[in-house]
Image (cartoon, coloured by chain):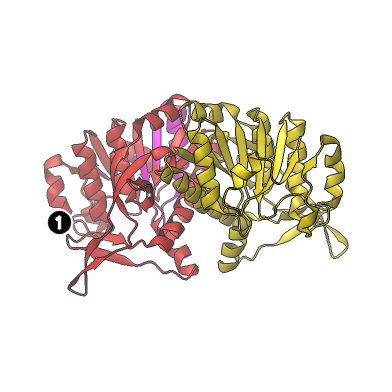
Chain colours: A red, B yellow
C-alpha cells in the first residue's frame, strides 16, 4: 500500500501524477490519494472577495486562518473541484476512484482548535472562530471496505470535529495519519520542489537521504510550507510508515521517479 | 427505502430537512439523499464572472448551459459545498452520512449530450461543448455496500460519461433513477413550492393526488423547473417506484409532512 499526497501548489501536474498512479494500480499496487488545494483555494477565495489570511503560530508553523466563510470556500474548492478533477482523471485511466473528504463516513475525526495562538508583527494574539483541526483518528474500516471492493480512495483535507463540524486539516499531516492507519509501506509527498533543501531555495542542496534521527533537525532548516511536510513525515515515521519520500510533482513521471529514489527519501 | 431529493432553490430549508431525515433514519428507515444546488451555483458562478446561461430545448425543457468552466463551478458548489453542508448536518444529528457525486465509484454513468438543440428568440440553434448528460445506469452495488455498512449516501448531481468525463445531470431525474434502481418505496421531491399547481403560481391550485395516468397531462401545465420534476416523477413511476411526492422543503417538518400526505402525491 502506498499513500500519495498530491500537493495543491502551483505547478503540480495532476495529469502526470494520475497517469503514474493509474499505471501502478493496474500493476496490482493499492494506492490511496490525498490532496491539498492551497493555490486554488487562494485564487477562488480572492475572486469571491475573501482573500486568504495566513497566520504563524508561536512555534513558527504557518496555517490558513479559517473562519466559517473560509471553511465553506475551502470545502468547495478541495472536496468539490480538485477532488472531482482527480477522480475524473483516474476514471479516464480506467481506475475506479472514489472521492471523499474526512467528513464523509467519519473518515477523519479531529480536535477543532477553537482558539489559536499566533504571532503577528511580533505581537502574540489569540484568534477565535477558527475552523481548523488536528486529526485524531482515521476510519480505517471505511478505507479497507472501499479498497477491498475495488475502489481507489481520493481524499480531500477536511475532517469532522468531535462536535460534528467540518474543519480544515493540513493535507500533509492527513496523509501521514492515513498512511500510519492503513500500515502503508510508503508515503510519497509530491510538491512543486524537487525535495527537501538544506538551503532553500537552492535546489542543488536537495538532501537525497535523511535518517529518522535527522528529521528533528530538518524541522529547523525547512522553510515555509516544507516545515509542515517535515512534521507530517515525522508523524508518519512515528506511526510506523517505513519510508517517506518528498518528491517533485511537476515532472513527466512524478510517482515513478519518486519510487525510483528521486527526491528526498526518509527511511 | 426512501429516496429524498433536496431541491437547490432559494428557501429550501436544509436544517429542518436534515433533522427530519435523521429522525426517520434513527427510527430504522433507510434513506438516500440526492440534492441539487441551482440557486447557489447561479450565485457563485456570477461572483466568479461566469453568469449562468439557461437554454430551452425544442421540447420546452429548460436546462443550464454547461461548458467546461461551468461544469467545474457546478462540481465545486454541488459536490463540494452543498454536499459537505448536508453531510455535516446529518453527522451533527448522529447519522453517518457519506457524500458522493455520480463520478465517484462510477455511481452514475451518463450519455453526454455533446450537441444540444435549443430554441433562442424563436430561432433553432445547436450548442456544442456542453457537459450535461442523461443518466443511463446507477451503480446499485455501491449504494447497497454503503447502506449495508451503516452509511447514509448523500449524492450530488454529477455523472461520469462513457468517455470518463464528469457531466452535470438533472438532480430530479438522478433521484428518480436512483429510486428506481434501489427499488425505493417512495421518492420525495422537496422544493420551494407546496406541490404541483394546476395554475402556477396560484398555491390554492395545488393538486393533492395525481394518478399515473394524469402524469402526462401534468407535463403540459407544469411550469419552468416543475416540468423536469414531473418528468423525473414519471420516470420513477415507470421504473417501479410506487409513490412519488412533491412537497414543500421550506417548512418545519418537510419530510414528515410529505410522508403524512401533504403536497402532491403521485401513486
> Chain for mark 1?
A
Q: Is residue A108 left or right of residue B151?
A: left
Which contiguous range is marked in magenta? Answer: A4-33
Q: Nearer the viewer, residue A23 or B257?
A: B257
Please check the rendered image and state whether residue A26 is part of the magenta-colored stretch, yes or no.
Answer: yes
Q: Quadrant of residue B107?
A: top right
Q: Secondary structure at mark 1?
A: helix
Percent coordinates x, y for residue B242 in the rendering: 72, 30
Quick one: label 1, few (<14), some, or many (20+) residues within 10 Å? few
B178 vs A47: above or below: above
Viewed as shown, does residue B57 lie left or right of A20?
right
Q: Is residue A38 left or right of residue A49?
A: left
Q: Residue at x 27, y 55 (%)?
A: A113
The foreground one among A87 and A124 is A124
The quarter of the image holding the C terminus of chain B is top right
Name which quarter of the figure residue A67 lies in.
bottom left
- Residue at image point 24% right, 34% down: A241
Indicate the position of residue B93 as horizontal and vertical percent values.
44, 43
Q: Position of residue B224 (x, y in %)?
A: 77, 56
The structure residue drawn at horizontal position 26% and vertical position 54%, both measured from the top left corner, is: A226
Which residue is the site of mark 1? A220
Residue at 62% across / 57% down in the picture? B70
Amino acid at each position: 500500500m502506498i499513500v500519495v499526497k498530491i500537493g495543491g501548489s502551483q505547478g503540480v501536474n495532476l495529469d502526470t501524477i494520475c497517469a503514474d498512479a493509474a499505471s501502478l494500480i493496474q500493476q496490482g499496487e493499492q494506492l490511496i490519494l490525498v490532496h491539498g488545494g492551497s493555490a486554488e483555494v487562494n485564487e477562488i477565495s480572492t475572486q469571491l472577495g475573501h482573500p486568504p489570511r495566513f497566520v504563524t503560530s508561536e512555534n513558527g508553523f504557518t496555517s490558513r486562518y479559517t473562519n466559517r466563510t473560509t471553511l465553506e470556500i475551502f470545502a468547495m474548492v478541495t472536496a468539490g473541484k480538485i477532488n472531482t478533477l482527480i477522480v475524473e482523471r483516474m476514471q479516464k485511466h480506467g481506475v475506479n476512484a472514489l472521492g471523499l473528504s474526512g467528513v464523509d463516513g467519519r473518515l477523519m475525526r479531529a480536535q477543532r482548535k477553537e482558539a489559536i495562538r499566533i504571532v503577528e508583527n511580533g505581537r502574540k494574539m489569540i484568534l477565535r472562530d477558527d475552523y481548523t483541526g488536528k486529526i485524531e483518528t482515521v476510519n480505517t474500516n471505511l478505507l479497507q471496505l472501499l479498497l477491498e471492493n475495488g475502489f481507489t480512495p481520493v481524499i480531500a483535507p477536511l475532517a469532522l470535529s468531535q462536535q460534528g463540524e467540518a474543519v480544515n486539516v493540513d493535507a500533509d499531516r492527513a496523509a501521514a495519519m492515513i498512511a500510519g492507519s492503513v500500515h502503508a509501506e510508503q508515503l510519497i509527498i509530491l510538491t512543486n520542489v524537487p525535495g527537501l533543501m538544506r538551503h532553500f531555495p537552492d535546489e542543488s542542496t536537495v538532501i537525497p537521504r535523511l535518517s529518522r534521527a535527522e528529521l528533528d533537525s530538518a524541522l529547523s532548516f525547512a522553510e515555509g510550507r516544507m516545515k509542515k511536510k517535515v512534521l507530517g513525515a515525522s508523524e508518519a515515521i512515528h506511526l510506523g510508515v517505513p519510508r517517506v519520500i518528498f518528491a517533485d510533482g511537476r515532472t513527466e513521471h512524478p510517482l515513478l521517479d519518486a519510487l525510483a529514489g528521486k527526491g528526498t527519501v526518509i527511511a
